[in-house]
Image (spheres, rainbow, N blue to C red):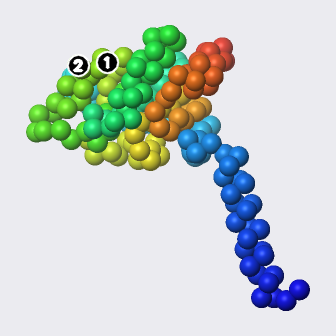
Amino acid sequence: MSKKYFIPLIAFMALVALMLFGLKNDPKVIPSPFIGQEAPNFSLPKLYKPEEMVTVKEMKGQVWVLNLWASWCVSCRAEHKVLTRLIEKMQVPTIGLNYKDYGTEDYGEEALTWLAKYGNPYQSVAVDTEGAAGLDWGVVGVPETFVVDKKGIVRYKFTGPVYDEAVDEILVPLITELRKEEG
């Protein structure tokens, strides 16, 4: 076989292999380098009490969830009822990390209005106006949800809006299992 036919054949086979690989993977599952690693710490002002800080360290010793959201995020609105159901069903402590929600000059006005309208299921709401904490967590967009174990190790990352099947098939079983582990 001539080289002029061999090179396009190799390129075509590589393209088919790449497409098959893509079809077997869930596009919502974006690998995170933080899985199995200690949760990145942050110290951010609380939405309702800006003089107080929210930190990851205060969550150690319990299984907890970090949910990044913003008032401008349409997908966050779509996931909010589902996330609220998870929090209520599992009674899982959850930090809502309000991500890059600039709003007006009034501190957190947009986030406060959004939570007043849709409800606040969070134990604490931290405000990350610059997005630095989100970057530390490897966030590619909002919403994103992380599950952290009792030792402070990130065990799961959910990219995009949490949906009912994910709650029932992934998050509830994971949180249940992590609660059984030694702290």
Q: Which residue is drawn at 33% across and 37% down?
A: 73
Location of the N terminus (image quadrant): bottom right
CA–CA distance in space, label 2 to label 1:
7 Å
- Residue type indicated by callout 1: Asn
Residue occupied by mark 2: 116
Observer-nearest of 23 and 85: 23
Q: In which quarter of the image is the C terminus?
A: top right
When the figure is inspected, residue 153 is found, relative to residue 82, above or below; the finding is below
- At which x and y percent is residue 138? 47, 46
Residue at figure coordinates x 50%, y 10% from the top left: 89
> Secondary structure beneath disc 1?
loop
Q: Looking at the picture, does residue 66 appear above or below residue 62?
A: below
Q: Is residue 135 left or right of residue 36?
A: left
Q: Residue at 34% of width from left, 36% of height from top?
A: 74
Q: Which of 30 and 137 is in front in this view?
A: 30
Q: Which amino acid does label 2 sit on?
A: Ala
Q: In which quarter of the image is residue 12?
A: bottom right
| Residue 83 image point, x, y percent | 44, 22
Neighbourhood count class around disc 1 (C-alpha, 10 Å): few under 14, some 14–19, many 20 upward:
some
- Which label was assigned to residue 104? none
Q: Mark 1 points at which residue?
A: 120
Q: Say how many tags the image has.
A: 2
Name the foreground residue: 164 vs 173. 164
Residue 85 rendering spot, x and y as whole percentages:
46, 15
| Residue that appears at 47% across and 37% down | 160
Would residue 124 be found to the left or right of residue 171 on screen?
left
The answer to whether one can see residue 150 in this image is no
Residue 54, by quadrant, is: top left
Q: Where on the picture, by quarter, is residue 152?
A: top right
- The secondary structure type at the circle numbered 2 is helix
